[in-house]
Amino acid sequence: MSETIPETWRPALEPVLSTPEARKLGGWLKAEEAAGKQVYPPRGTRLAALALTPLPEVRCVILGQDPYHGPGQAHGLAFSVQAGVRVPPSLVNIYKELEADLGLPRAATGDLTPWARQGVLLLNNTLTVEAGLAGSHAGRGWDAVTDACVAAVAEREKPVVFILWGSHAKKKASRVPALARNSAHLILASAHPSPLSAHNGFFGSRPFSQTNAFLEANGRGAIDWRL
């Protein structure tokens, strides 16, 4: 694995990344790139969510599935795209719900870095994807790495909000026993913001106001969701 593990996440991730399975994942990624396949996001940004959101500062976790697979989109944060890139449909719907929930105007940018810097861990389950092929790196070994990230947050005493959009995020959370054991946390589950499912319970779920109400009640401060 060529990515540098951010300092605060090392105790949680070094045991996982030292396993044969993780080394196999790293070798497979190198082979894919050596064969000329385009992998997103680029090297050096695949752990960006962890670099921008140190473990002790996590206040909210939003779980995604895998990175965007279009050119210039993925940069290591779930649901986020780089500045200047067209806002994807799921993020458009997230902005619609944010406007309905908190009255905030829809952002012109899809870059969610300001959220990450405030303790919102924007974590995909699978941290790489082949260009143009959604889900192409699922089942290759990233699950163990990102499960360890979720477990590290869930094991902390400070209350955290886990926002689970869609069945994929819910299944991931169910694989982390520490999340079920620690009643200090708040779990908000709803439909995915994708245009295919947003009208089945995502719209009207008010995750942003619920998150802030919980964090403030537990002395962790509200997140400024403005972009």
Image (tube, rainbow, N blue to C red):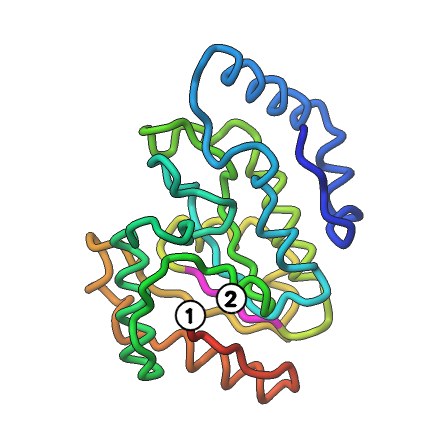
For marks 2 and 1, give the one nearer the viewer.
1
**Residue position marked by numbered label 2 in the rendering:** 115
Q: Residue at x 56, y 35 (%)?
A: 142
Q: Residue at x 55, y 13 (%)?
A: 31
Tag 1: residue type?
Leu
Q: Between disc 2 and disc 1, whose residue precedes?
A: 2
**Coordinates of residue 19 in the picture (x, y in percent):** 73, 28
Quarter holding residue 25: top right
Disc 2, SS: helix
Q: Residue at x 28, y 51 (%)?
A: 86
**Coordinates of residue 132 in the picture (x, y in percent):** 31, 29
Label 2 neighbourhood size at 10 Å, few (<14), some (14-19), many (20+)? Answer: some
Dominant secondary structure, magenta: strand
Q: Are marks 2 and 1 in contact (CB under 8 Å)?
A: yes
Q: Quick one: quadrant of the C terminus?
A: bottom left
Give above or below for 98 relative to 26. below
Give above or below for 57 relative to 2. below
Disc 1, SS: loop
Q: Residue at x 57, y 32 (%)?
A: 43
Tag 2: residue type?
Trp
Disc on res. 180: none
Q: Quick one: quadrant of the N terminus?
A: top right
Q: Is residue 99 left or right of residue 3?
A: left
Residue furthest to the bottom: 217
Q: Is residue 119 left or right of residue 19?
A: left
Identify the magenta region: 160-164
**Residue position marked by numbered label 1 in the rendering:** 227
**Coordinates of residue 49 in the picture (x, y in percent):** 58, 52
Magenta stretch encompasses residue 163: yes
Magenta stretch encompasses residue 78: no
